Structure formats: structure tokens, C-alpha cells
């Protein structure tokens, strides 16, 4: 079970975007990377490409690039602090628990 999932709020703890908070848009578990909204925004110069019937928009495109999962920490929804996540069993289900306040995250 992953400690950070899509839809979680995370805070960046190292790198250029340190102290920014955002929502996890995508998790790439094989590469240990995640995509966070409004964090690590990069520009890509896109040339117009006509493939079949669809045409790709040309120009400078901005998008969020993946960052390493070790550079972010989970933000607890109840205590609103960045925290580590632990696991416990509740009613036979494995759930995430905040290490700061002890409340359930899931």
C-alpha cells in the first residue's frame, strides 16, 4: 500500500519549489515519482504535428513535470501539518494513520 496517493495534499520539502503545497495529480510508482499541481512547472516548445486527423497545438506549452517522491511529505487533513504516514488495521482494512496526531488519513 502506498503512503502517498492521488488526491492527497503534499508539501515540497526540498528543491526549487520548497514549502509549496499542492494536490497529487498522478503517481508513477515504478519510477518513484509524482506529479503535483502547481509544482515543478516546465515549458516545452512544441512544433505543430499533424498525425492523422488530430493536430497538436503548437507554441510554448507549460505543464507540471514529475518530481521525486522523497522530496515531498504528506499533509494531514485533520492537523494540517506535514507528517509521516503509518499504517494500522481498522475493521480488517489496512488504513493510513497520521504520525503527529494519530487520526486516520483515509
Image (tube, rainbow, N blue to C red):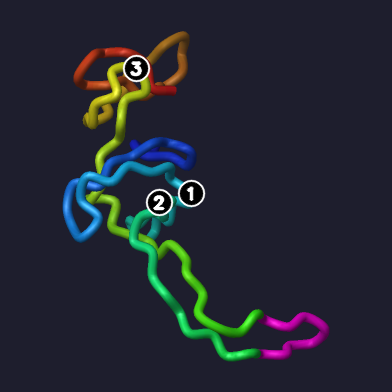
- Cβ–Cβ under 8 Å for marks 1 and 2: yes
Q: Which is more N-terminal, label 3 or label 2?
A: 2
The question of residue 55 being in magenta is answered with yes
* Residue that lies at the very extreme toward the front in this rendered image: 59
Residue annotated with mark 1: 25
Number of the label disc, if any, that sits on residue 36: 2
Kindly indicate the quadrant of the structure image that contains residue 2.
top left
Residue at (19% x, 19% y) in the render: 100
Kindly indicate the quadrant of the structure image that contains residue 3.
top left
Question: How far is disc 2 from disc 3 in space, using C-alphas?
Answer: 20 Å
Residue annotated with mark 3: 78
Find the magenta span and give its range. Answer: 49-56
Q: Residues within 10 Å of mark 3 (few under 14, many from 20)?
A: few
Q: Residues within 10 Å of mark 2 (few under 14, many from 20)?
A: many
Please name whichever residue, 88 or 27, is drawn nearer the observer in this view of the structure: 27
Vertical placement of 19 versus 50: above or below?
Answer: above
Residue at (40% x, 53% y) in the render: 38
The question of residue 1 being in magenta is answered with no
| Position of residue 14 measured from the top left corner of the image (x, y, whole percent) | 17, 52
Q: Secondary structure at mark 3?
A: loop
Amino acid at each position: 500500500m502506498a503512503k502517498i496517493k492521488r488526491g492527497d495534499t503534499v508539501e515540497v520539502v526540498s528543491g526549487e519549489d520548497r514549502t509549496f503545497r499542492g494536490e497529487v495529480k498522478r503517481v508513477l510508482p515504478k519510477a518513484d515519482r509524482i506529479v503535483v499541481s502547481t509544482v515543478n512547472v516546465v515549458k516545452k516548445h512544441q512544433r505543430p504535428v499533424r498525425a492523422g486527423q488530430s493536430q497538436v497545438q503548437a507554441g510554448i506549452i507549460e505543464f507540471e513535470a514529475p518530481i521525486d517522491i522523497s522530496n515531498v511529505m504528506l499533509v494531514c487533513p485533520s492537523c494540517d501539518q506535514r507528517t509521516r504516514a503509518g499504517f494500522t488495521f481498522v475493521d480488517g482494512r489496512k488504513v493510513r494513520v497520521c504520525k503527529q496526531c494519530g487520526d486516520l488519513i483515509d
